[in-house]
Amino acid sequence: MSQFLSYATPGLPYGCVFALLGMGLVLTYQTSGVFNLAFGAQAYASALVFYECVANGWPTWAAFLVAVVVGAPLLGLVMDRGLYRFVRTKPVLVKLVAALGMLIAIPAVFQFAFPGGNRYNPPSLWLSPSIVYFHLAGDPINGSELSTVILTAAVALGLSLMFHFTQAGLRMRAIAESPGMVELAGINADRVGMASWMLSSFLAGLAGVMLAPVFGDLQPLNFTVLLVAAVAAAAAGSLRSLPYTFLGGIVLGLLEELLGGYLPSGHVLSSGLRPGLPFVVLLGLLLFLPGLRRRWTRSDDPLAVVRPPPAPLASATRSPSLRRTSRLGTTVFCLAFVVSCLTWVSPNWVFNLSQALALAIVFLSLVLLTGMSGQISLCQAAFAGVGAFTAGQLAVHFNVSILVGMLIAGVAAGAVGAVVALPALRLGGLALALATLAFGLLADNIGFQYGWSGNGESGISIPRPVLGPVNFAGDRAFFCLTVVVLGLCIGVVMAIRRGTTGRQLAALRGSELAAASIGINPRRAKILVFTLSAAIAGVGGAVYGSLETSVSASDFNTLLSLVFVVVVATVGVYTVEGAVEAGLAYVVLSTLLTSPGLPAAWANILELVFGAGAIAYVLHPEGAVEYVKRLVVEHLARHGTEIEVLA
Amino acid sequence: MTALLEVSGVSKRFGGIRALEDVSLEVLSGEAVGLIGPNGAGKTTLFDCVSGVSQPERGAIYYQGRRIDRLPIHRRARLGIGRTFQRLELFTGMTVREHLAVAEREHSGDGRLWKDLAWRGGLTSEETDSVEAMLKELHLESVAESPIEALSLGQGRLVELGRALIQEPALLLLDEPSSGLDSRESAELAAVLNQIRATRNEAVLLVEHDIDLVQAIVSRAVVLDFGRVIASGPLDDVLREGAVRTAYLGEPA
Ligand SMILES: Nc1ncnc2c1ncn2[C@@H]1O[C@H](COP(=O)(O)OP(=O)(O)OP(=O)(O)O)[C@@H](O)[C@H]1O
Ligand SMILES: [Mg+2]
């Protein structure tokens, strides 16, 4: 028992932080319908500001005032007014992309504003972390742990007083408990939404500042991963109950440390499973808590479905001549592109553009999944990783040609995709997104750490292929291979789109009920697409790996999956061209912004651009490219006349 | 001869509301039966139970002698139960022709994944013919290429009808096909339905408030009120019964 206690005690401060974050999540989800994945980023922002203030010699209380009491709610206010209030009534994909955009953009903004290298040993808020105040069950309790617990208890008390006695609090609770009642009762949902964003942002800021000393190193990724623990806590409260969320957070923190105590140290399981625990818990809750499942998959829940996409331009304009011209233009452009890459473009850029096309294959998997079937996956990078590591291991250990390996990579990733899809697709919408997020993090933290898979940070090498007399070792030769594989994958996606499966998916997007009533099996269709999409991502990963010739787990980390979704959504998720354009935009921009001679902080601009792109996405879900094309066509229509544009 | 559809003792509640209470009825193959009753009587709920949209709490449903009340929607559809919806359920973003094409493809069962991948996922010539024939039968040729959002309510109902009919169901459930139509459109609909009845031998279960339309099509009727069957038999007899007149036509007993 005393050992149990001594293992459990260090978990309490973590639990407190999870609880705070979870409550913030529930608060904003209930009042605005946005599942705020950017929560960890907000926590990071406050911790960063706090760090900078203290580093500049401010007293702790002043830094706290600026970073948490004023700064954090201000950030929440800006996010609500600038973005979230517009997405309240939008479909789940839009909400998710908006939040993901913030997740990516916020750390970038703050790193851009406060350039500087690593920030070690963040200051603690109140009591010194290096002083041990007393021992509990044999555990030394230091100042940062003690202050975390005390502050959390104070905040929890304050919140519960607020929710029971103040008008603003009562209104928030009213909204949280029955969103439909709000308009009836004449409460201004907009104002309450704003207040809850400020409050939850304050909670995030507080949690961030308290947690920073525990991490020892101020890194956005640490805070992002926190998010999943918060989500798991919120799930324990069925996304609705604040007290249960609080409890869930605490229990999770304790469990995590207990696992750490009882599992053999040094083993992958303990270094992986411990941080992986929130994901496991989240997956378990999603799959087995029936109330939660019902809540997230209720068909009348506006969050449960992705709205069908606007008709792509090709079908919205009925002008054969325009279509012919645009097809001709595309062909000429593609040819010119390939020819240029084979002749005058510098080897460095050929390599970069091959990267872009390899990524385009992965992005294509999102076009198939999200654009055509309205599902959201936050683990495409993990599927790409499965593909890359499969091809690499086969080549290294069994001497399998990489070309064959790419095919097998597709099959392997597809198989993993099917395994993920089978339970997760019972969920759909937001829950599917969270389940895939959890899976991605598990793959990342555990799956890819073994020697037989991704071999952790050291990674594995993947040779370039040789086909008879043709050697693809050169960058130009490999570029050709990438073009061919991309072409094949595009062919597959287009064949699916115009075939039976594509029609079934279009019908399902239009009305799942009606689709089932003519004999379409919704589950089968969705699992099929999810599997195919994972397979394509796997092929893309294998191509990418072979291009790079060596890859490690961090090349396929979960953050990338999130970035992928945002990038593809901003550029255009409903068309095949969108994937290619997204690949090019992403790689070209990041290459330009990180080219030597530019200030290091400029690298953050890429994230800023796509974060801002997420805002554009909220306004134009068809994506930037389709939007621009439409503008051009409308302009032509005004001056030409023969083109008919459907609204 | 066994019935095509046999509903036996079906009950369904929504919270405290008894939407269906021990409902039994039969439809023989090729027969047109009217299901009538006031608003909230449970007609749509019965359709939902038959087509698989919701599960009855008690009772059993047999179709072609086989128990179907645990099968998912799409399996029942494949067995030959087609339906339309009281609130239109169309595929947003698709044209009229595409609606029929996707239904025809499900019916012909020709959709294998490898065919898609081999770039052979398009409609076969027989399928195209059948889509054209259906467009013609329902007088929808002129709007064949229109997106569904551009259609009138009446045309939307016809598209739903066509989507169900093209699969040649043995049992067709029509849920208030004339609601929201003006009298001219209703008359046209009656003509179309009669023509279909004359040329095919689907059994029809028709929910309809427009008594003229009911009389034009069905010979037998079942009357629901507050979830219970209060009368059934030949249409004219049923309409003469006092209880039916009170419940349905709002006449004093
Ligand atoms: N999903 C549901 N949840 C709660 N109650 C429902 C639901 N569906 C139907 N009901 C209730 O069940 C009863 C029967 O409804 P149903 O729609 O079957 O009636 P109906 O005969 O089709 O009426 P109408 O002529 O208006 O279409 C009604 O009281 C209705 O309010
Ligand atoms: Mg009804």
Image (tube, coloured by chain):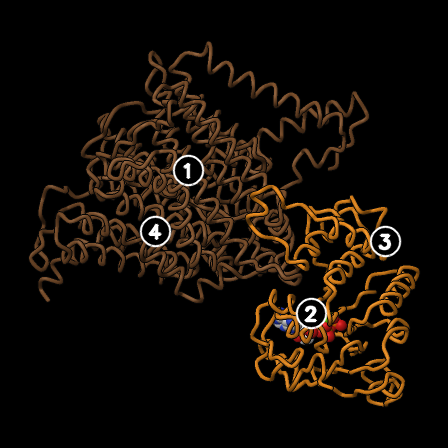
Chain colours: A brown, B orange
Q: Amino acid at mark 4?
A: Ala
**Residue A46 appearing in the image:** no
Q: Mark 1 belongs to which amino acid?
A: Val
On whether disc 1 and disc 2 are found on a single subunit, the reply is no
In this rendering, which labeled residue sits more in front, label 4 or label 2?
Answer: 2
Could you tell me if residue A581 is visible in this image?
yes
- Residue receiving disc 3: B136
Q: Quadrant of residue A628?
A: top right
Residue type at tag 3: Lys
Tag 1, which secondary structure?
helix
- Rendered-image quadrant of the N terminus of chain A: bottom left
Question: Sequence order check: which comes first, mark 1 or mark 4?
Answer: 4
Badge number at residue A230:
4
In depth, the one of B45 and A80 nearer the eye is B45
Name the disc covering residue A539, or none: 1
Relative placement, left or right, of A612 versus A257 is right
Q: How many C-alpha atoms fall within 10 Å of the one at disc 3: few (<14), some, or many (≥20)?
A: few
To the question of a shared chain for discs 3 and 1, the answer is no
Tags 3 and 2 both on a single chain: yes
The structure residue drawn at horizontal position 33% and vertical position 13%, both measured from the top left corner, is A596
* Residue nearest the observer in this picture, A528 or A148: A528
Where does residue B31 sit, x and y in percent of width and height? Answer: 80, 78
Compute the Cα span from label 4 to label 2. Answer: 47 Å
- Amino acid on which disc 2 is placed: Ile
Quadrant for residue B191, please give it.
Answer: bottom right
Chain of the residue displaying label 3: B
How far is the residue under mark 1 from the one under mark 4? 33 Å
**Residue A631 quadrant:** top right
Distance of mark 3 from mark 2, alpha carbons? Answer: 23 Å
Which residue is disc 2 drawn over? B81
Are discs 3 and 4 less than 8 Å apart at CB?
no
